[in-house]
Image (cartoon, coloured by chain):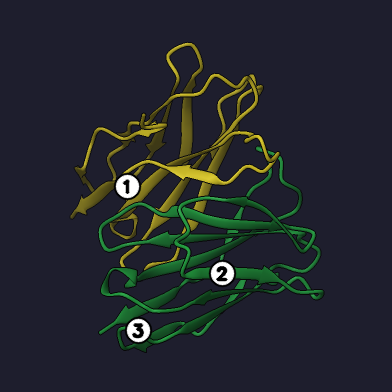
Chain colours: A yellow, B green
Amino acid sequence: AQKITQTQPGMFVQEKEAVTLDCTYDTSDPSYGLFWYKQPSSGEMIFLIYQGSYDQQNATEGRYSLNFQKARKSANLVISASQLGDSAMYFCAMREPRNSGNTPLVFGKGTRLSVIA
Amino acid sequence: AAGVIQSPRHLIKEKRETATLKCYPIPRHDTVYWYQQGPGQDPQFLISFYEKMQSDKGSIPDRFSAQQFSDYHSELNMSSLELGDSALYFCASSWGTGSYNEQFFGPGTRLTVL
């Protein structure tokens, strides 16, 4: 079963507008971490924002905020005031403990965001 | 601040050849992860090391092996390369293995198998 689901393969947003990228996750472990990464066409994986399962407040990092709804198991990324440089692939990912005690990232399929001038 | 270093950045190999990818984690990070990202795909976890010991395996083919050395750098060895091995290979490091610890990614090695 897919652990991370991103239902939007592609999104368009007008420059300076806000956009929400959806992410739902599946886990039975009470302790987990949720991450968003940006991958521009150059290929590098850029960390954007993190939300821990026990965090009471929604995470924010500059123009990025995470709309964390634990009961719905969703962790949507909100980008405010979109810029042309925000055009990229965005991945939602989760870390949860495995039997080994290790916590590799499990990624969603990604959402390609295109910002239009 | 120092980041994760991967070398080489680009590698072209023929089918059935071998390849070695290197990863130098951020200083004092004790955990290294390897991921494979095929064209148009999401990254898939291959293998990880904690304190120089293999800690977990994901979807790593038997043709691949990896190790972490005493200086914490890691190498991914790939033998009998196939066309399907063409991908972007990321190394990531973190301090500790907990789910709250951010993984810092290297720039990746783009492997092309001809």
Nearer to us of marks 2 and 1 is 2
Where residue B42 sits: x, y (%)? 35, 52
CA gap between label 1 and label 3 equals: 46 Å
Q: Is A92 on the left or on the right of B47, as rendered?
A: left
Q: Residue furthest top?
A: A71
Residue hosting label 1: A82
Q: Are marks 2 and 1 in contact (CB under 8 Å)?
A: no
Secondary element under disc 2, as helix, strand or loop, is strand
Chain identity of mark 1: A
Chain identity of mark 3: B
Where residue A30 sits: x, y (%)? 63, 19
Q: How many marks?
A: 3
Relative to the observer, which residue lies in front, A92 or B62?
B62
Residue hosting label 3: B16
Q: Are marks 2 and 3 in contact (CB under 8 Å)?
A: no
- Determine which of the numbered discs, if any, sits on residue B65 in the image: 2
Identified at 80% across, 75% down, the residue is: B71
Residue count near mark 1 (Cα–Cα under 10 Å), binned few <14, some 14–19, many ≥20: many
Residue count near mark 2 (Cα–Cα under 10 Å), binned few <14, some 14–19, many ≥20: some
Where residue B110 sits: x, y (%)? 39, 76
Residue type at the position of mark 3: Arg
Residue type at the position of mark 1: Ser
CA gap between label 2 and label 3 equals: 15 Å
Q: Is B95 on the left or on the right of B90, as rendered?
A: right
Residue type at the position of mark 2: Ser
Q: Which quadrant is home to the C terminus of chain A? A: bottom left
